Amino acid sequence: MAGFYQKLLENNRKWVEEKVQADPEFFSRLAKGQSPPLLWIGCADSRVPANEITGTLPGEVFVHRNIANMVIHSDMNMLSVLDYAVNVLKVRHIIVCGHYECGGVKAAMGNAHIGLIDNWIRHIKDVYRLHQAELDAIKDEHERFNRFVEVNVKEQVWDLAKTSIVQNAWKNGQQLWIHGWVYSINDGLVKDLEVNYSNNEELPNVYQLQM
Ligand code: CO
């Protein structure tokens, strides 16, 4: 344990050395500020690191992660990140990235009582209910699990589009695209679900806000 912990600090120093060697201005440039073109909303899972997957550097991705990459419309943490990313940083893209083998989604398929987290998982169960006919029709449990991961990402992209923050940006003519991805733990590849929205006109009428 101590070995692992000490190694983290050593790694940090090594990383700084390498960065400065390759680009002496690396840190002084970043210290001046950030203007990332992308907001990433991903799962907290340790196997899904936003920068590494996308080949991006510090300064390029604003990141929000939680269990099962959820966009919960009353989550102040998510809303604060979203507001800052859209209205201050003016990101041009938001990617909701889920992943196969997601423990949160798996838990939502089952009935185990885990603890406080049950109440977070509840949101994912709501997604199951919305897609119950399609999901229940998939007999193979692992295939059903994979599809549940995908429809969960789709619903989170919709939930982003429904927020007042995103709708307001669109009404103001801000260039803002939202996308849904699923990352494969098995081979590292991303599947683009091709749910790409840049206006609120595809939202069901009841969600469309007259800004
Ligand atoms: Co996950």
Image (cartoon, rainbow, N blue to C red):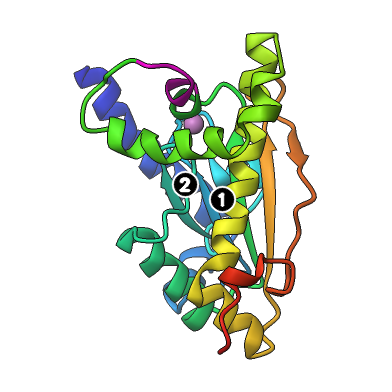
Q: Position of residue 201 (x, y in %)?
A: 73, 74
Q: Does the segment drawn in magenta span residue 19?
A: no
Residue 105 at x, y = what percent? 50, 28
Quadrant assignment for the N terminus: top left
Residue 112 sits in which quadrant?
Answer: top left
Boundaries of the magenta span: 106-111
Tag of residue 179: none
Distance between mark 1 and mark 2 Cα atoms: 6 Å
Identify residue for label 2: 70
Give the structural element (helix, strand or loop) at label 1.
Answer: helix
Which kind of residue does numbered mark 1 sit on? Answer: Gln
Q: Nearer the viewer, residue 10 or 51?
A: 51
In percent of width and height, residue 60 lies at: 59, 62
Q: Position of residue 116 (x, y in %)?
A: 21, 32
Above or below: residue 78 compared with residue 144: below
Q: Nearer the viewer, residue 96 or 152?
A: 152
Q: Residue at x 21, y 25 (%)?
A: 115
Residue beneath disc 1? 156
113, 53: nearer the viewer:
113
Q: Quadrant of residue 189?
A: top right
Q: Is residue 22 visible?
A: no
Q: Residue at x 25, y 28 (%)?
A: 6
> Mark 1 or mark 2, which has the lower sequence index?
2
